[in-house]
Amino acid sequence: MVKQKFESGRIEADMMAYLSSLLYGTEVQLPQPVGMYIDDQGNLVSVVRTDLDPVNATLEAGWQIEKNVNFFLCEFKGEECAVVDFEHVFTTYGNCYTFNAVVDPDNPRRQNLPGAGNGLNLIFDIFSDSYTEDPEQGGSDDVGMKVLIHDQKEPPKMDTQGIAVGPGSHAFIGISKVEYKNEIPPWGECQDRELQYYDEYTLTGCLLECRTNHVYEQCGCRLFYLPGQ
């Protein structure tokens, strides 16, 4: 699931200067002289950071799950779950969090009976007033969350998949599983294919690998949420 890329309350002046071109298409100049402070050892320290990049900026200023701040209820089959039950993953939306991402053979999480009380129940505060994207500057005007239910072996692809849930509302999401089996010759026209960045082949994993390889061929780099080194 996912919310906006960055929260205004988490962005300091130096990070805003770094992100302003991405968020608003303009550069923000820090006031001169650049802010300094004296640390506990009496050293003069600059408040301007030099270690900012898309990864740590998103980790620090992107939406994060915080118990009793924006994360008020998590229950699975009537039992309480916590922040540690979610795995962090980068997507096109920034920080996303996956429940039941890791297979635990000693404690598998399975819903055996239908009904809302027998599955996953979540309540979040989305803090829409802290959104940083500006639609007038080309940013998204979406408000709310996006939820995607996917196989544990399949990476999430939030830009083209998932269900949008608006603020001030609740959603019941029913699911069913459709399984495709591609037959290799002589029974079919498909070929066995191994992925470079994923242990098992999935269509979503293949699409993400194709995207990252294309971007690297064109630009010599890759987006931080795409697979690869």
Image (spheres, rainbow, N blue to C red):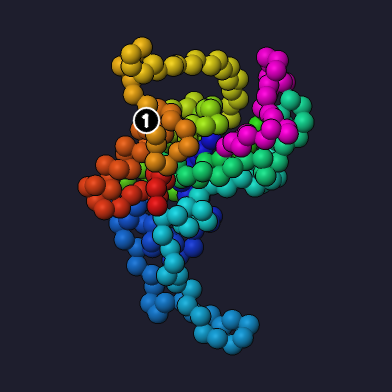
Q: How many marks?
A: 1
Instruction: In the rendered view, tell whether residue 20 sits above or below residue 64.
Output: below
Extreme residue toward the top, this view: 187
Residue pictured at 68% horizontal, 29% vertical: 109
Is residue 113 toward the left or the right of residue 91 in the image?
Answer: right
Residue pictured at 41% horizontal, 44% vertical: 227
Is residue 168 toward the left or the right of residue 105 in the image?
Answer: left
Instruction: In the rendered view, tell whether residue 44 sits above or below residue 85.
Output: below
Instruction: In the rendered view, tell whether residue 21 sits above or below residue 210.
Output: below
Question: Which residue range is magenta in the image?
Answer: 98-120
Q: Position of residue 113 (x, y in %)?
A: 70, 15
Residue pictured at 50% horizontal, 50% vertical: 62
State the SS at label 1: loop
Residue 225 image-quadrant placement = top left
Q: Position of residue 189 (x, y in %)?
A: 31, 16
Residue 140 appears anywhere in the view: no
Q: Amino acid at mark 1?
A: Arg
Residue 60 appears anywhere in the view: yes
Query: Crowdedness of circle 1 by 10 Å Cα count: few (<14), some, many (20+)?
Result: few
Extreme residue toward the front, this view: 186
Q: Position of residue 118 (x, y in %)?
A: 72, 20
Extreme residue toward the left, this view: 218
Is residue 123 toward the left or the right of residue 205 in the image?
Answer: right
Q: Is residue 13 magenta?
A: no
Q: Position of residue 89 (x, y in %)?
A: 51, 43
In this view, the residue in front, 161 or 207, is 207
Residue pictured at 39% horizontal, 36% vertical: 195
In this view, the residue in front, 204 or 34, is 204
Q: To which residue does mark 1 refer?
A: 193
Characterize the magenta stretch by its predominant secondary structure: loop
Extreme residue toward the bottom, this view: 42
In this view, the residue in front, 73 or 228, is 228
